Image: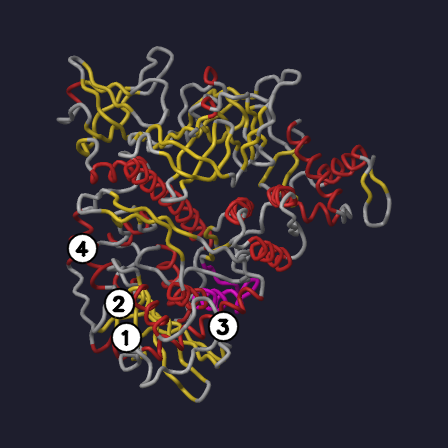
Amino acid sequence: MGKTNKGGKRMSKKQLAEKLEGLFSSQPDKTLAFKDIFRTLHLDTHPLKMLAIEIMEEMAWDDFLAKASDTSYRLNQKGQVQEGTFVRKPNGKNSFIPDGGANPIFVSERNSLWALNGDRVRVQFMARRSRHMKEAQVIEILQRKKDEFVGRLRVDKNMAYLVTPETTFVHDIIIPRRKLKGGKTDDKAVVRIIQWPDAEHKSLVGEVVDVLGQKGDNDVEMNTILAQYGLPYKYPKAVEQAADKITGEITEQDVREREDFRDTWTCTIDPRDAKDFDDALSIKQLDKGLWQVGVHIADVSHYVKEGDIIDREAERRATSVYLVDRTIPMLPERLCNFVCSLRPDEDKLAYSVIFNLDDDANVKAYRIVHTIIRSNRRYAYEEAQQLLEDNGVVDGTGQPAPPAPKGGYRGQYATEIITLDRLAKLLRAKRFANGAVKFDSEELHFDVDEHGKPTRCYFKRSKDANKLIEEFMLLANRTVAESVGKVGRGRHAKTLPYRVHDNPDPQKMETLREYIVKFGYKVKTDGTKSAMAKSINKLMDACEGRPEEKIIQRVALRAMMKAKYSVHNIGHFGLAFDYYTHFTSPIRRYPDTMVHRLLTRYQAGGRSANEKHYEELCEHCSDMELVAQNAERDSIKYKMVEFMGDKIGEEYDAHISGITSYGIYAEIDENHCEGMVPIRDLDDDYYEFDERNFCLRGRRRHHKYQLGDAIRIKVAQANLEKRQLDFTLAG
């Protein structure tokens, strides 16, 4: 039966396919987004839209279309030889991703030409066999993704090998003994490939670049994680020496050129163990019902000049990396912890956004200015939170501050903190009313001893003190973006790195809709940004406190696109901002330093910066952010496995946190450590993976394992080298 559009006319799959074919053929050089296709073909109903997506998937399968992104296609005009990226999988199901982001093409091991994950390759498409998937054969490796690898040394009498934790290679890397650099068996080492496989030699040959130390040592293991991702685990001496020459002295000219806020009450609120304070808040009453709130950001670009040795290293790193027990800073320690850090009772240079806010937190005026400040007090989040609670401020109420206790507010500067909290809650409420998505995330934290060994594992939730800082940073970032983006349009537009977040993936939203129906919930999968966001928030509110809450939140998060940096502004879906950038953390993020420099340039009347150059920097920063997140995740996995290492054989209550074709991921309720029950251990039936419904289903007995189910597990194995916890089902 055909689908019906709004006008009541039925349309068969064949008719819609013909319309789509005609549309793409008439615009052979154009990439068409779903929304444009739906509008052009008058596909006004949800069933018609989903049918169109299904047809386009089939057309891409048949090579008529090429997938440009998750929500767009173009006519496929490429030949049988293409270039792109090779993706290696441990299970041998390798793939090739053509340039332009089209669908992955399967590459068998025998046709891989020993390409490694991330290599740029040229492939030849193979003749499609009936009822078989499309395959490609690598015919040339154009560029290696990397030539250095990390692993554990195994030294034999005549030869040595590097055993890598991931199954990147079919064989271990051979290392001639003269190239060992003093490495011994079980040392972790960085090895550079000096001979790649070819038709004559199937082996990889390498030389040791750096010996990290013996496996099991905490510092060695953390450095191993960094090295695996190509992240620096040492700071270059020349860069540190350049930083040591920066005195941090504030001259009389610096003071003359800046607004002086040293007499305005100012504080920092950061994690207890933080040393790099890159943001501070000031507040004073201007008039009855009118407050001046300053968001003061460390003026890194005053000290780090574009193109100098410190800047080049910061650009390369692009971000600080936060492992469980350490920070690998973007800037040398002298700058991030001393010269630039907004430490209490010290004069500091800042770049500030000064707001005039009324009692309802409406912005009546703002200015973006270079300042000199002096922080009166450094708070840890816990201290600021305690101050709020001691004064009767209930977490998350959004209510005005209560009357002062008898004898005045308890705690030094309590009135200032309470006023900032009240204004922040009003800002937050407006943001959600305007369509911001409400995901209250939890972060896994570890307490570690002096040797780095984890002693406790727990979730940390954001409280009012965290949200207070977050809200003013969001306001400053948004205001800075608007100050550039709203003013200049068209040929007057000025280049700025924006933080952009695209609309959710339509197909994943449809998967979410289908999944939550069984719990009795609904969600909008199309419509305006605001309508979709409000629908997601309504869903989050409806499932709050219920057994399925975490699972629904997880599936909803999967539908969200990844935020990234770009000079091409498309707005930020999650925050419901038309303009957004990163301005507030230049000590730990390079894009913020870029924004500071461009703002200074534009305020001085300078011309727009080179768009292409800044887009390349944005792409680099987005890539490095992802690499840093993966390294951080691996450090958490390592500590998780280490924490559970002495608990083999113990049983715990858990719930299913993930389902894959190869097993069940389970999170222990007591300590939130996650491990996997391999599918081979589910021996009471033959289980099949139902991807749409996030479950494993038994073929004979029809027993189901699905997301959120409560189960009892036993800890079977804790493999530190693979950073992998294995569970079995108990009982």
Describe the element under mark 2 as helix, strand or loop.
loop
Q: Which mark is residue 588?
A: none
Amino acid type for the residue under numbered disc 4:
Ala
Q: Quick check: marks 4 and 2 in contact, CB under 8 Å? A: no
Front one among 249 and 514: 514
Q: Nearer the viewer, mark 3 or mark 1?
A: 3
Across and down, in percent, residue 473 comes to: 41, 65
Q: Which mark is residue 242?
A: 4
Q: Earlier in the sequence, mark 4 or mark 2?
A: 4
Measured in 3D between alpha carbons, the distance from the residue under mark 4 to the one under mark 1, in whole angstroms, is: 25 Å
Residue found at the far front of this picture: 731
Q: Earlier in the sequence, mark 2 or mark 3?
A: 2
Within 10 angstroms of label 3, few (less than 14), some, or many (20 or more) residues? some
Q: Quick check: marks 3 and 1 in contact, CB under 8 Å? A: no
Q: Nearer the viewer, mark 4 or mark 1?
A: 1
Amino acid type for the residue under numbered disc 1:
Ile
Amino acid type for the residue under numbered disc 2:
Leu
Q: Earlier in the sequence, mark 2 or mark 1?
A: 2
Q: Which mark is residue 426?
A: 3
Quadrant (top left, top right, bottom left, bottom right) of the C terminus = top left
Q: Earlier in the sequence, mark 3 or mark 1?
A: 1
